[in-house]
Amino acid sequence: MALARVDHLSFAYPGGGAALQDVSLAVEPGELVVLLGPSGSGKSTLLRALAGLVPHFHGGRFSGSVEVAGMDTRVRRPAELAGAVATLFQDPEDQVVMTRVENEVAFGLENLGLPPAEIPARASAALAAVGATHLAGRAVAELSGGELQRVCLAATLALEPRLLLLDEPTSQLDPEAARALLDLARRSGIAVVCSEQRPALPLERADRVVFLDGGRVLLDAPRERALEWLRAERPAWTEPRSVHGRGSARELACRVADMSFAYPNGHVALEHQSLELRRGEIVALVGANGSGKTTLAKVAAGLLESQGGSVVRHGRAGYLSQDPGRYLVAERADEEVALGVGGNLERARTALAAVGLAAAADRHPRDLSSGERERLALAAVAVIEPDLLVLDEPTRGVDPERKAELADRLRREAPRRATLVVTHDLVFAAAVADRVVSLDESSEARVA
Amino acid sequence: MSPGPAALLLAAVGAAALLAHRTGSVAVLAVLLLAVCVRGAGRRAWPFLLGVGVTAGAVLVVTPFVETVGWHVLWSGPTVPVLGPLDVTSEELHGAVFQALRLAALSLAFSAYALLLDHDRLVQGAAFARRSALAVVLATRLVPTLERDARGLVEALRGRGVEVSGLRGRARLVSPLLAGSLERGLNVAEAMEARGFGRAGHTRAPRPPWTRLDRLAATGAPLLALVGALWL
């Protein structure tokens, strides 16, 4: 008997169009189902429907039914489903409740009414399972994004759910940590439904693949058959598109030599690192969580002052933060972009048009979808026409088709400037970069 | 030290500063609390210390002009309608220093509470009003989160060549910070419901027993407040 069953589910958010249309699927116990689909295709909404958050938390128009562990989500509230279902949301910062790690992991267990004596042991075991025992006494405000993601996973696994819902769980993790997380979820024996935009790792482990587009299920098939379908219908999801026309490096844009950096809390982020960026080339900077990629990128962009060593920069630098939520200062999209060019709305609208947002110029940035916000952020930085463009995790939460568009654009514009791309997405790095610099081994590879 | 006794001790130091009537005593308490904040929280303490400095400084500057006590005039200014003559006496200056130190000591006691205590355990120590206690925990989390968001916004602006400076520049960040907080609040509420918050029959993780130091602090706290009232 299926652990979860979705039957002819259609749903629209209040005041919005259809997010899901006539979706039916079943999840068997112990099965790993990978949910794929472009941004806005309904993946997160489907996960929320399985957790009962749609419709109870969000409201909206709901038809059809969802049943999880024998409970009808129309009748049972999400809090009643908790324990049978657990959700790991995309952004760990938006799901943490308590101020200390061990209390955070215990929070769900307290809600479920576990006997008090059992709570510390269950919380410790969950932290150990995700390799985060050393974080137990820490304040959550002090943790990095990757560490926080692990704590959130521990809080989820501590509930010992029968169905685990993962909403882009690896978006902030390096490949090794992402592999470990998915293996852990797989080994736990729990049924897992995992939505992903970096499909390579989950596809290796999936039992079944569901592909959504426009709120409809286009594919629901076992792994092998799904891979065949993806190769034929959506090749970007299985094979990264190769980008032709590598650039030729010209004059120096930035040189960081023998640089070290320590944060005020004493954490040494980098020691004796060097990096050279030349106009016309794209360099990908990769490495594990905490290896200092973002620090090095910020030093190159002039946002952090190097402590020791030297930094030489020729021309203007632009830095794209990995959080598109940081480009929501003004009241209109064109005014937001114009901030970097002294309020020149004409240049701002041209930059918006270049990322396909010409029609959104007069909209409030907060009314844009997550995909549109990412493009707005890129326009806000590109408009200043920097000689050095630094992009920090530009593919986080971006679907493979959009990534291919971004790679095309970066390659097309590469001759105008030097480009540094900080990324965990090795597939994207290989597709776009002339050189890949790894901070793990302090090594450098030239892409053929 | 457990958060309950530590909070009691901080409250007692704050009360002692409020009840003391010697400037030197209040100054000693303020320096003590400053050392606790800096030593315990390091660089994290700076935003709090800045707030303490600004408010205490404002009291120090404004008080001599709004008080009219003392005969030893140090400076005579013009007569302003409503406020009267703007002069500064040595008695007023002494009063201003005393009030500023008192405010600084109280603010530093709160800073130490905010920076160093395990608020989760502290508010959960109340055996009633779980929802209200949780609201306090979430509000406490808001401060570092807002601080991080503000840093992120400033950094993103600098990354496109926009320097944020002055009151006007920073005021521009208030609206996006508030809007971001509201969005985050909704997301946290959703995550809480998904983790069973609001379900009947909840329990609480056991708290570690008090140590000798905890008992000493809990006993000593009222005595400290009494000492402040009678002898400091």
Image: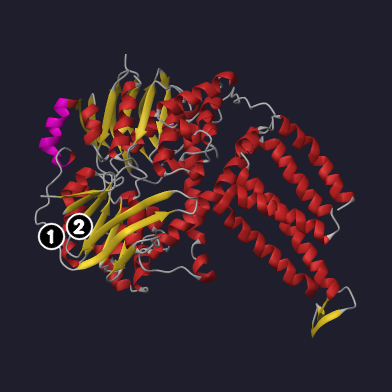
Quadrant in the rendering for residue B90 = bottom right
Query: Is disc 2 placed on a helix, strand or loop?
Result: strand
Q: Amino acid at mark 2?
A: Ile
Judge left or right: residue B195 versus residue A47.
right
Question: In terms of depth relative to the viewer, which is nearer, A59 or B160?
Answer: B160
Residue named by callout 1: A247
Does the magenta-highlighted stretch encompass residue A232? yes
Disc 1: host chain: A
* Range shown magenta: A224-236
The quadrant in which the N terminus of chain A is found is: top left
To which residue does mark 2 refer?
A282
Give me the chain letter of mark 2.
A
Q: Is residue A106 visible?
A: yes
Asked if marks 1 and 2 touch (Cβ < 8 Å), the reply is yes
Q: Looking at the picture, do discs 1 and 2 lie on one chain?
A: yes
Under mark 1, the amino acid is Gly
> How far apart are the two marked residues, 1 and 2, measured between alpha carbons?
8 Å
Q: Is residue B13 above or below residue B126?
A: below
Q: Is residue A167 magenta?
A: no
Q: Earlier in the sequence, mark 1 or mark 2?
A: 1
Residue projecting furthest to the top: A1
Q: Which mark is residue B167?
A: none
Other residues around mark 2 within 10 Å, as few (<14) / some (14–19) / many (≥20): many
- Looking at the image, the residue that sits furthest to the bottom is B78
Considering depth in this image, is A99 or A197 the residue closer to the camera? A99
Q: Is residue B152 shown left or right of residue B38?
A: left
Q: Position of residue A181 (x, y in %)?
A: 34, 31
Residue A81 can be seen in this image: no
